Each structure stands twice: as structure tokens, then as C-alpha cells.
Image (spheres, helix red, strand yellow):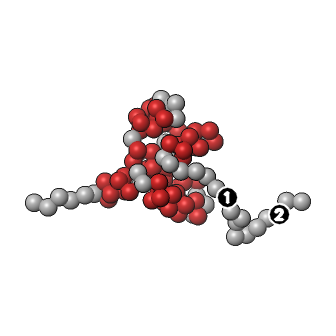
Amino acid sequence: MKNYRTHDDYLNKALKDPKEAALYMNAAVEENDPALMLAVLAQVVRAHGISKMAKKISLSRAGVYKTLSKKGNPELKTFMGILSASGLEMSFKPSHTQHHVH
């Protein structure tokens, strides 16, 4: 019998690699959809393990689940903590449609 891996198994393994996680997160950012971004962030956290991530960012497991739920709205501190604990960092670039503030 062949050993089959599910899509989630493959994705969880891939997202443990910061380079793969960065590609996945950047693809979500390009869609400019906050719900998608939150779902992708949650997938990265699940790949690393909810309990491990909760310890690394000093948040309870319940707090992590609440933060990453569909109604969640992570604080910037929590968002940056998750990125750091996942081996990621945030960067910025000019948008395609530049809006200048005067």
C-alpha cells in the first residue's frame, strides 16, 4: 500500500520552512484580502503547532485560537510575534497605485 500524504500534510511540512512560508504569506498579501491573510497566517501557525506558537508568543492556546478565528483581529504585537516565531519578518514596498499624502 502506498503512503499517501494529504494536501494539508504537505502544506504543513512546507510552511515550517521560512522561505516557503514567506512565499505563501506574500501571495496572500498580494490579494489584498484581510480574511485570506488571516487564514494564511492561521495555516502557518498550525504548521508550527498551536501550543508551541502560543508559548513562543506568550499567549494562551485559547488566545491563539481566538486571534486566528474568522472573527479574529490580531494586534500588531501578536502578528509580529507570530511572524518572528515562524522565522519571518515584515517588509514594505510601494504599491502599484501610489497615493501620495501631502
Give, as a three-letter code, the residue at label 1. Phe
User: Can residue 4 be seen here?
Assistant: yes
- Quadrant of the image occupied by residue 100: bottom right
Q: Quadrant of the C terminus?
A: bottom right
Q: Residue furthest right?
A: 102
Amino acid type at mark 2:
His
Which residue does the numbered mark 2 point to in the structure image? 100
Query: Is residue 77 toward the left or the right of residue 88 in the image?
Result: right
The residue where tag 1 is placed is 92
Q: Are marks 1 and 2 in contact (CB under 8 Å)?
A: no
> Given the current orientation, which residue lies at the most extreme left position?
1
The residue at 73%/69% (across/down) is: 97
Percent x, y of residue 91: 64, 56
Q: Does dot 1 land on a helix, a strand or a loop?
A: loop
Q: Nearer the viewer, mark 1 or mark 2?
A: 1
Q: Secondary structure at mark 2?
A: loop
Q: Is 84 left or right of 101, judged from the image as shown?
A: left
For image coordinates 45% across by 38% down, the residue present is 53
> Upstream in the sequence, badge 1 or badge 2?
1
CA gap, disc 1 and disc 2: 16 Å
Residue 56 in percent (x, y) is at 48, 35
Residue 11, label in figure: none
* 97, above or below 8, in the image: below
In the picture as drawn, the residue positioned furthest to the bottom comes out as 96
